[in-house]
Image (tube, rainbow, N blue to C red):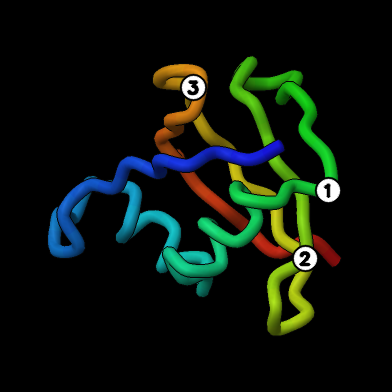
Amino acid sequence: MGFSQVCWDLDDDPRGNVQHIAEHDISKEEVEEVLEHPAGIERSRSSGLLIAFGETTTGRLIAVVYEDISDDSVYPVTAYEID
């Protein structure tokens, strides 16, 4: 399972998802890796959004909070590294 289309805001949009994810020292590529091959998916108890968990090729374990747009498209809201 994975998502073929990841929707990003403009890189320089200060309110966009690219900037928000970068604040957590996560790259777009890492987010896409996890969304393409998630190890697990859960629903956030606080926001109700979906969270994909997975390991990147650099060995980081991250969580990606996202919104479903369609069957194969998602909009990442934020991402963070898991200890």
Q: Residue 75: image x %, image y %?
A: 40, 35
The image's mark for residue 19 is none
Within 10 Å of the Cα at label 3, are there few (<14), some (14-19), or many (20+) other Cα atoms?
Answer: some
Viewer-nearest residue: 74 or 9? 74
What amino acid type is highlighted by mark number 3? Asp
Image quarter in which the C terminus is found: bottom right
Going from the N terminus, do you reach mark 2 or mark 1 first?
Answer: 1
Dot 2 falls on a residue whose secondary structure is strand
Relative height, residue 53 to residue 23 (above, below) = above
- How dense is the environment of label 1, judged by Cα within 10 Å: few (below 14), some, or many (20 and up)? few
Numbered label attached to residue 55 = 2
Residue 9 position within the rendered picture, expressed as x and y whole percent measured from the top left:
22, 47
27 and 22: which is toward the camera: 27
Q: Callout 1, which amino acid? A: Ala
Disc number for residue 68: 3
- Mark 3 vs mark 2, CA separation in Å: 21 Å
Q: Quadrant of residue 80?
A: bottom right
> For this view, does 61 lie left or right of residue 26?
right
Question: Which residue is painted at 32% across and 41% down in the image?
Answer: 7
Q: Is residue 12 left or right of residue 55?
A: left
Residue 70 drawn at (x, y percent): 43, 18
Residue positioned 52% across, 34% down in the render? 66
| Amino acid under disc 2 | Glu
Disc 1: which residue: 39
Q: Where 71 sits versus 17, above or below?
A: above
Sequence-first disc among 3 and 1: 1
